[in-house]
Amino acid sequence: MTRFMLTLLALGMGNAQAAQIVMEDQSQLKVLPASAAAAFSPPAESELPDNAFGKMVREGHALFVDTRRLMPNNVGNGLNCSNCHLDQGRMANSAPLWGAYPMYPAYRKKNDKVNTFAERIQGCFQFSMNGKPPAADSPEMTALSVYAYWLASKAPIGVEMPGRGYPDVPQPAQGYDFGRGEQVYKDQCAVCHGSHGEGQSVANDYVMPPLWGKDSYNWGAGMHRINTATSFIKHNMPLGKPGSLSDQQAWDVAAYINKHERPQDPRLIEGSIEKTRLKFHANDGVNLYGQKVEGVLIGQGTGK
Ligand code: HEC
Ligand code: HEC
């Protein structure tokens, strides 16, 4: 049974209003069967040529999986690129680099312009890594782009391939619930990510990435949207058991994680959470920035 049919069933076929919402929301069409997502496979490391190009690919790979250590001036939190783009940027449904590279340049609503691939990566540095983006013509940006280009070898250009991004998970009829999310978190996430979302570190280096707090993604990152975190979590977490959470559990736990404080949105306008909410968050998916949850204003940011 397709997810689309399940959604209709979950909403109750007799409910005219709910059916109308489903008709308007085409996002479920992007959820592809696992067999389709496996259609493209990036080249194996053994296929890398032993020349200048191969060397650059290796450098880009190293920066992607060890970003924090190798680019301390550009990373402001405890994360590496590969923490959210799993299997070194190769995994389908984990925003793989091979799905991304052939889709740029592309217009992005986020900064209201056509972005090159380098500009797209700069966005992840600024928000997901809470850092300072390297220049578009820096050796690091070249290496990261060359790595993505190589992973996309033989992929079509300008065609959205199955497995790109984090496929949408429709919001259940019941919405989401912080209490249920907390329970999912305690049962299935805390063992690795810590009971306060702090991750785990050994010798000052994270072996399990933090989910909130000063070393996590900031309030401007795509992952701060509950819908985007849900999509990531549903298809990638708990690590080693992708797809095991129900849609409801994924929404609940994503909402629980994203009600916790994290570094401020670097686009903060005149120190005002409300102005920043209106300009950048009011039309940005499902998010809690600038709202009150359980009497507390969300989006105050954590000290660094
Ligand atoms: C906290 C999680 C997180 C981290 C860390 C992160 N990203 Fe991302 N990245 C995302 C999210 C979320 C998206 C948006 C995916 C979508 O649109 O569905 C994204 C999108 C992208 C895209 C575009 C994907 C596409 O298909 O258009 C690229 C390229 C990318 N990231 C590269 C990087 C690089 C390089 C780094 C490290 C410097 C990095 N990311 C670090 C979460 C992260
Ligand atoms: C077995 C350990 C383990 C469990 C259990 C686990 N994770 Fe993760 N999680 C990881 C690791 C490791 C990464 C980074 C992946 C990588 O670098 O390859 C990660 C990455 C993440 C990220 C993106 C990176 C970041 O820090 O923001 C999120 C969000 C996340 N996990 C949420 C969850 C949620 C929610 C659950 C429970 C439903 C969960 N995880 C369960 C180990 C785990």
Image (cartoon, grey):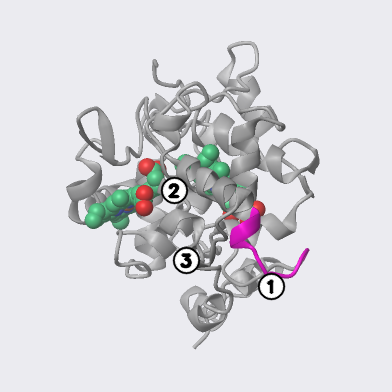
Q: 133 or 279: nearer the eye? A: 133
For mark 1, what is the residue? 23
For mark 2, what is the residue? 82
Q: Which residue is drawn at 36% across and 34% down?
A: 212
Secondary structure under the numbered disc 1 in the rendered image = helix
For mark 3, what is the residue? 46
Question: In which quadrant of the rendered view does residue 269 lie?
Answer: top right
Q: Position of residue 152 (x, y in %)?
A: 64, 63
Q: Quick one: label 3 or label 2, which is nearer the N terminus?
A: 3
The residue carrying pointer 3 sits among few (fewer than 14), some (14 to 19) or many (20 or more) residues within 10 Å by Cα, namely few
64 relative to 200 in the view: left or right: right
Q: Which residues fall within the magenta stretch?
A: 149-158
Q: Quick one: label 3 or label 1, which is nearer the N terminus?
A: 1
- Could you tell me which quadrant the C terminus lies in? top left
Q: Which amino acid does label 2 sit on?
A: Ser
- Of tags 3 and 2, the one toward the viewer is 3
Q: Position of residue 232 (x, y in %)?
A: 46, 56
Q: Which amino acid does label 3 sit on?
A: Ser
CA gap, disc 2 and disc 1: 35 Å
Residue 243 sits above or below residue 292 on the image: below
Residue at the bottom extreme, as displayed: 1
Q: Which residue is drawn at 55% across and 59% down?
A: 96
CA gap, disc 3 and disc 2: 20 Å
Residue at the top extreme, as displayed: 270
115 relative to 301 in the view: left or right: right
Q: Which amino acid does label 1 sit on?
A: Met
Majority secondary structure in the magenta region? loop
Q: 117 or 19: nearer the eye? A: 117
Q: Which residue is drawn at 75% across and 52% down?
A: 104
Reply yes or no: does residue 156 show up in magenta: yes
